[in-house]
Image (tube, rainbow, N blue to C red):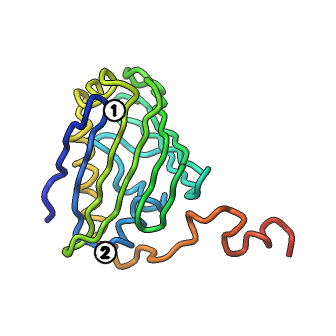
Amino acid sequence: MPDPAQVQLEGDQSVIVERSFAAPRASVWAAFTNPDVLGQWLLGPPGWDMLECSIDLCVGGGYRWRWRHGDTGEEFGFTGTYSEVQIGARLVDTQSFDQGTHALPAGGAMQNSVVFEDDGNGTRVVTCIRYPDVATRDMVMGQGMATGMETSYARLDHVLATSGAALPKETDAGLPKEKRPGAAKRRGVL
C-alpha cells in the first residue's frame, strides 16, 4: 500500500500534493480522466456521492463534477476548463467552485496542474493547486482538503488494484475534437 499523500504549502497561495500509486501510469491517467472510473473514487469523506462527472478532455474542453451528501442533502461541485492536456503526462486547468447548497463561500478561480510520472514502482502524481489568495487557500485547508484527498486516493488504490488491468491504456482524449478518430464522420462530412 503506498504512503499517504504528502501535502505542502508553497508560497502564499499554493498547495502541492504528492502521492504514489502501485499501478502503471496509463492506468492512473485513465483513472483521473475517464469519468466512469473517476466517479468510483473521487468522493472525499464518507457520506458523499458523486452525482455528476463529465469530462471533455481536450484543450478548451472541460469538466463538471458534483456531489451530494447522503444525510444532509448538501450539494457542491467544481467546473474546469483545460488549458493543457499532455496525454499520460500532464493536465492544467482553471477550476471554479460551485458552492451549491454547501456553506463554504465560492471564492475565485483556482489554477491546477497535475503531473503523472513513472517512479519505478508505479506512478507518482504531483498536483499543484494555486488559490486566488492566501485566505481561500487557508480556508480550504482548514476544511480538511488534505484528509478528503487522501480518502479519495485510498479508494483509487482499491480501484487500481481490483480493475487496473481493465482500465483503458490508450485514448484519443486530449486531441482537438476535429482531430479525434471519426470526428469528420460525426460532423456529417464523410
The residue singled out by tag 2 in the image is 24
In the image, residue 38 lies at what x, y percent? 41, 57
Distance (Cα) linking label 1 and label 2: 36 Å
Quarter of the image where one finds residue 180: bottom right
Q: In which quarter of the image is the C terminus?
A: bottom right
Q: CB under 8 Å between callouts 1 and 2?
A: no
Picture layout, residue 138 above or below residue 179: above
For disc 1, the neighbor class at 10 Å (few under 14, some 14 to 19, many from 20) is: few
Tell me which label, 1 or 2, sits earlier in the chain. 2
**Residue placed at 24% from the left, 31% from the top?**
141
Quarter of the image where one finds residue 156: bottom left
Inspect this view and state whether residue 172 appears: yes
Q: Which amino acid does label 2 sit on?
A: Pro
Q: Is mark 2 on a helix, strand or loop?
A: loop
- Give the residue furthest to the front: 11
Inspect this view and state whether residue 161 appears: no
Q: Is mark 1 on a helix, strand or loop?
A: loop
The residue singled out by tag 1 in the image is 71
Closest to the observer: 103 or 137?
Answer: 137
Closest to the observer: 60 or 40?
Answer: 60
In the image, residue 59 lies at what x, y percent? 59, 54
Q: Which amino acid does label 1 sit on?
A: Asp
In the image, residue 85 lies at what x, y percent? 51, 59
Picture layout, residue 113 above or below residue 14: below
Q: In which quarter of the image is the N terminus?
A: bottom left
Numbered label attached to residue 8: none
For disc 2, the neighbor class at 10 Å (few under 14, some 14 to 19, many from 20) is: many
**Residue placed at 81% from the left, 65% from the top?**
187
